[in-house]
Image (tube, rainbow, N blue to C red):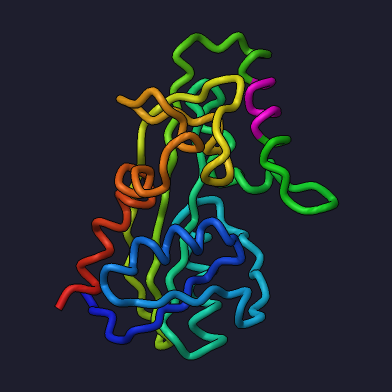
Amino acid sequence: MRKFSGKTLLVATHNKGKLEEMAALLAPFGITCVGAAELNLPEPAETESTFVGNARIKAHAAAKATDLPALSDDSGIEVDALNGAPGVYTADWAETPNGRDFVQAMKRTWAELETVSAPFPRTARFRSTLVLAWPDGHDEVFEGKVEGAVIWPMRGRQGHGYDPMFQPEGHEMTFAEMDPALKNTISHRADAFRKLVACFEA
């Protein structure tokens, strides 16, 4: 496994919430994160049908554009009763002419579950794939997940994306009700990150 050497890491995302999560997870290693939006990098088209495919697109595009190592995340929620949807298209379900609206996406998800009379608990999982790419084209891939269920109505104001309707297994709160520090120890991104840290350890 190739090690990361440096104190600043480019995070290939325009998602402020995702950048904040990454920064919090990397802070103990003395690494400062800078987001793609801060460097005015364009968002590449995510044309793959898998999390790892789209994560690679984002990481390699950012690394090539800046000549810096870049970390990307492609993540989403898979709902079992919807045959794994929205999955890799999680962000697409939130797209509107005025930007992303995850409340709309969550309403659609619940409506589709109601349409098929999905049994309870309505099991689901968040998946996260991290790709750390270097300008020379090398990359390392790390995958994580957290099991749970989707609930309604939405609860909580923390987090981002589908957090208000996702209740992780073994917990009474949704991700959006949790203190971010707690979420960052059990989330899908934290699971992938536990594997990624080998790149940062001496």
Q: What residue do we see at 41% from left, 55% from top?
A: 129
Q: Which image quarter: residue 35?
A: bottom right
The percent coordinates of residue 58 (x first, y second) are: 54, 69
Q: Quadrant of the C terminus?
A: bottom left
Q: What residue do we see at 55% from left, 12% from top?
A: 118
Q: Report the predominant secondary structure element of the magenta stretch.
A: helix
Q: What residue do we see at 35% from left, 38% from top?
A: 146
* Magenta stretch in the rendered image: 106-112
The percent coordinates of residue 56 (x first, y second) are: 47, 67
The percent coordinates of residue 125 (x first, y second) are: 42, 34
Tell me, yes or no, whether the highlighted magenta stretch contains residue 80.
no
Residue in front for this viewpoint, 161 or 133: 161
Residue at the outermost right position = 97
Check the image and report above or below for 72 versus 156: below
- Is residue 42 found left or right of 17 in the rendered image? right
- Is residue 33 found left or right of 202 in the rendered image? right
Check the image and report above or below for 47 versus 35: above
Q: Quadrant of the N terminus?
A: bottom left
Check the image and report above or below for 200 versus 101: below
Q: What residue do we see at 61% from left, 18% from top?
A: 113
Residue in front for this viewpoint, 101 or 131: 101
Q: Which image quarter: residue 117?
A: top right
The percent coordinates of residue 62 (x first, y second) are: 53, 78
- Is residue 53 found left or right of 101 in the rendered image? left
